[in-house]
Image (cartoon, rainbow, N blue to C red):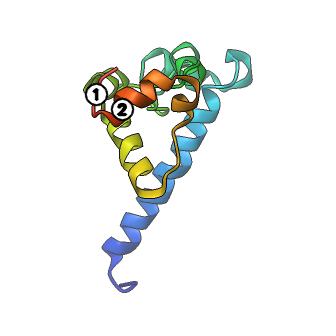
Amino acid sequence: GSENPMVSLFFAVFCFNEIMSQELHKWSHMTKKEVPEWVNKIQDLGISIGRVAHAKHHMAPYDGNYCIVSGVCNEALDNSGFFRWMEHKVYDINGIEANSWKLDPELKAKTLRGEYAL
């Protein structure tokens, strides 16, 4: 409970990381001149996702590149079909279709057949 300092530490670290993930994502939408120089450096080093890599996340048919903090896992997760599998599970639970399905009926059909890899 709240008497355990490890619980407080967990939530502090969790909240910090959540907030920073949103900042890192926001900075990938901004120009080099709009962000501090250290942000440009961590993007150049691949610690945080850069503008060009992140732009793939916003390109039709919106079927991949969902890792918006560093992008390190995008290729592996896209090739493994992880996100297609997740979209299928969400659809099975609540009937809501992924946006990519609306743009690409063949992607929807493949996903519903269990063909998850891109």
Q: CA distance from mark 2 to mark 1?
A: 5 Å
What amino acid does circle 2 point to? Thr
In percent of width and height, residue 11 lies at 43, 66
- Residue underneath mark 1: 115
Question: Does dot 2 land on a helix, a strand or a loop?
Answer: helix
For residue 22, above or below residue 8 = above
Label 2: how many Cα within 10 Å (few below 14, some 14–19, many 20+): many
Residue at 44 percent across and 22 percent down: it is 106
Question: Does dot 1 land on a helix, a strand or a loop?
Answer: loop
Q: Quadrant of residue 102?
A: top right
Left or right of residue 1: residue 63: right
Left or right of residue 113: residue 109: right
For residue 4, above or below residue 37 = below
In percent of width and height, residue 80 lies at 25, 27
Q: Is residue 111 visible?
A: yes
What amino acid does circle 1 point to? Glu
**Quadrant of the frame with the C terminus:** top left
Q: Pointers 2 and 1 in contact (CB under 8 A)? A: yes
